[in-house]
Structure formats: structure tokens, C-alpha cells
Image (cartoon, helix red, strand yellow):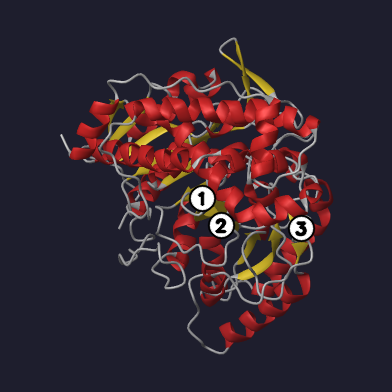
Amino acid sequence: MSAHGLVNEAASRYPAPMEPPLTIDTLRTLATLQGLELTDEELAGLLPLVQAGRSMAESLRGALPGDVEPASQYRIM
Amino acid sequence: MNDLVWKSMVELARLIRAREVSPVEVVQAHLDRIASLDGRLRSYITVLSDSALAAAKAAEAAATSGETPGPLHGVPVGLKDLYCTKGVKTTGGSRILSDWAPPEDATVVSRLAGAGAIVLGKLNMHEFAYGPEGLNPHYGSPWNPWDAVTHRICGGSSSGSGAAVAAGLCPGALGSDTGGSIRIPASLCGISGLKPTYGRVSRAGVLPLAWSLDHVGPMCRTAADCALMLGSMAGYDPRDPTTSVLPVPDYMAALTGTVKGLRIGVLRPFFMESAAAAERRAVEQAVKTLEGLGASVHEVKLDTVKLAAGASSAVIAAEAYAYHEAWIKKRPQEYGADVRERLRVGAFVSGADYVNGQRARVLMRNEVDATLARLDVLVAPTTPISATPVGVGQVEIGGEEQPVRPTLIRFTRPFNATGHPAASVPCGFTAEGLPIGLQIVGRPFDEATVLRVADAYQRATDWHARRPSLAG
């Protein structure tokens, strides 16, 4: 196993912290930090989409072995 | 009705070369048809009548002067409106770029012109290519030519390209494909479309949706026409550093008409098993046809395909947001509501989530490569469903309600993530008369085999030769 995998195996002995649930207030704060000015209605529309994205990202994290590198410049040949 | 508008690009090129027909006649026939039908179809954003006719006259003069014609000499094409066209409004299907005319052509536009093609106009699309339905609030949503009564989606984002080719408003078009945007409209509009290998065709001068997932490719009525166009488009481009230096094969010569001895993998779990009944039946029959032509058929499973949704979503969202960030902050109301919302989601994708998306792509690519080491192509339905009415957000498959948008891209986006070449060709119709597409996936840079299988299938069937009801 690569060093990468060994490090991740060591880290996995500790349970991952629970991600806090996303609320409109949290989303508003995140949006403000990003420079986005959104109304409450817009935030309410975005909330389920951002939640869905976070769920998919969490599933992906769980499915990736530790030693896979990203395609940093994605080219085949 | 003028039969010239139903000729293939291969046939038009031959007729023009043989001086049996003039490029002026061909271009005029298409312009007349656009004038007659496009008020309803809305496949074009900009029609370039004057410049197309001028180019046709020049092509006619060149043909009679004995100059050696290019492979597409005098043949009309349409360009999805995200291909920069020098001095011509290039909107990206948006209001934001509604008055923008680029100072130079995209590389592929130059290459097609160099091959002798004549641009009829700029084709409608989902705004900034960010949607698989092909809708457009600024220029009107194209009408699927296969239903004269109900306004159905053409599929996107290359919706105008799909509608125009299907209805005889151009014999071939350029599309682009980030999650399925060539193959989905090809499937829903009953035409042939090819997403080449990532890096086979230059993206220079093409408005991006997601740089690492965008692919440039042809949409035509036949696989042979896709081969003809690809031959003029493909190849290394110093303006696009992701293009490959691998030589471009003679795609037309690869169309041997036979699939004898080829090994075909049928993608059953995730693909066939989650398609609607009509799509499953049509693809099963297509596989039997290929087997009857001498191919061997094998069952295939891709375990990593379940990563495609998460990987693609994170990568597209982050890359699209990076491109649009300044506009979405300063001019949000100029976007359509769906694209505005989708773009904003990208602001909340973390760096780690983006990188994990790119890591997942490597796993997926490795598995498809390993599978294609023992097979020549993989096949599946292009989409789980056929064209839905505009405005319908849910569709029933096997008794279960599913949202239309993610359903449309389910079978196509894995091969954007992996970068493998993938084509869609018509393989049947639903009981409502709506087209069904067969997706054919090949090894990296083996577009020749993908097109060979598609062409052999089209020589044995006539789905691709049928004409839609709205087209007259």
C-alpha cells in the first residue's frame, strides 16, 4: 500500500465528524462569503440542490481508495 | 419538396464534385426550407443567408475553375451558437452575449471552412450549454420535429443542432457534449451524433461549460457523415493544449460495412435495466442485428459507473461557476432561472469535493479501459427515455416517477467523465413515434471502430432514413 493509503488508513481509525445540517442561515453565510447576494426565496430554492451536491460528495469520499490521484490535467494521450 | 435537403453530406459532396449540382442550389434549397419551417422549429438563432450564398457562389466558381475541392466543398453546415464565428453574433444561447461577435473563428470552424463547408447559420441551444432538455427562454425552445402536435424537448444542450439536422434544415451540424449534449439530442431527434475522445478535437474558440468535460463533435443524419466531418475537424491544435498529437486516421476508409469478428459488450446493469421498456426492446433488437452481422455479444458490468453522478456534478458545477462567476454576481437576472440556479450551486462546491470528482474519473476511466481491452465497443441505450413534453418535470419508468433532467444524462455522462468516444444512432421508435438512440462507446482515439459499427448498423437498418412528421 502506498504512503497515501497508509496515512488514510491511520486516519480512518477515528470516526469522521458529523457534517452539520445545512440551513438557509448557513447557506446565506456561505453565499455572503462568496460575494453572492441572494434573497430568501433564492436561498430556499438553492438549499435542496446544494444539499444534494453535498450528499453526492460525501458518497464519493466514501467510495474512493486513498491512493487514487486526481486527473489534474485531464488528457488521455 | 426539394430532395437536396435530404441528401447526406457524403452524397452532396459527391454531387458537387461531379458538378451534377451547384453549391448555390444546395444552399438555396436549405435557406428556403429554413424560411419555411424554422418559424415554428426555432432551431436557428442567426441565419447567414447572404454570406452562405456568397460562399456558395465562390464554391461554384472554384469548382468550375478546376481547383481541387476539399472534402466538404460546397456542403452546408450549421454551428451550435457557442462556436466563435468571426464577425458573427455568437450568443451561447444567452442574453449576456446577445450582441457579441468574436474577432476570430474557433479552430474547428476554420477547419470546416478550410475543407470547403458553407455555414448556414448559428444554431439554438440550452443557455450556455447548461441543460440536457435544450430549452431556451431568450430565443425560444426548439420544437422536436417528431411531434407536430405537442411541443416536445429536442434534448440538449445542442437542441437546435438536433432539430435542424432532423428536419432537413442542414445536413450536418456542430454540437458540443459535456454530459451528453450531442448524444441526447441525437437520440431524441433521431439523428447520428458523435462525442469523440477528449482531446481528439480542439475546443479552442468554443465557449466552455466545463473545460475538463467539454467535447466537440458532429451531428448528422448518418454515421458516414459524422466520419466525413470528423476527418476535417480532428487533430492537434496548439491553441488547445489538451489536444492529442496522435495522427488522424482516415475515418471514411474505416467504414468497411462489416462488424464480423468484432466483440460487443452490452451494458446491462445500470444501463439497460433502468431504461424504459421501449428503449430496452429497441436496443436488444439492435444488438441482435449486430450479432446477425457477425459480431459476438458479451454481457458487461461497470462497477464504477455509480460514481459518475457525484464526480460529474462536482466537476461541472465548479468549473462552470469559475467561468461565469463575474457575470453571475453582477448580471444574475440576465440568465434564465434554471441556469442561474445551477450556476450558483457551483459556488458551494469545496476544493476537496472538486478534486475527489477528478479522482473518481480516474477510477471510472481505468475500469472502462480494462473492459475495452477485451472488447471492441460497448453498447447501451443513449437515454432511458424518449422526448418528453416541454414543461414536464417527471417521467414514469417501470412504475416509478423520476425527474426528467438527471434521467436524460444518466447513460451519457459516464463517458464524458472517462473521455471515451461515444456515438448515438437511431435504433427504433416508441409507440408515440418518438426516436430511440443506441449508444456505442469505444476505446480512446478509436472513433474509427465506433463509426464502423454505427455505419454497418445503418447499412442493415433504415431508422436513420425516416423523416419527422413536422418536416413535411
User: Spatial distance from mark 1 to mark 3, Cα to Cα?
Assistant: 35 Å
| Cα–Cα gap, marks 2 and 1 | 7 Å
Count of all numbered marks drawn on residues in the image: 3
Q: Mark 2 falls within which chain?
A: B
Q: Position of residue B171 (x, y in %)?
A: 61, 57
Choose mark 3 or mark 2, whichever is in front: 3
Q: Nearer the viewer, residue B201 or B165?
A: B201
Q: Amino acid at mark 3?
A: Ile
Whether tag 3 and tag 2 are in contact, CB under 8 A, the answer is no
Residue B241 coordinates in the image, percent (x, y)? 41, 66
Q: Which residue is mark 1?
A: B222
Q: Is residue B359 visible?
A: yes
Report x, y in % for residue B45. 76, 57
Left or right of residue B39: residue B457: left
Q: Residues within 10 Å of mark 1 (few under 14, many from 20)?
A: many
Residue pointed to by mark 2: B8
Q: Is residue B306 above or below residue B211?
A: above
Q: Residue at x 63, y 61 (%)?
A: B79
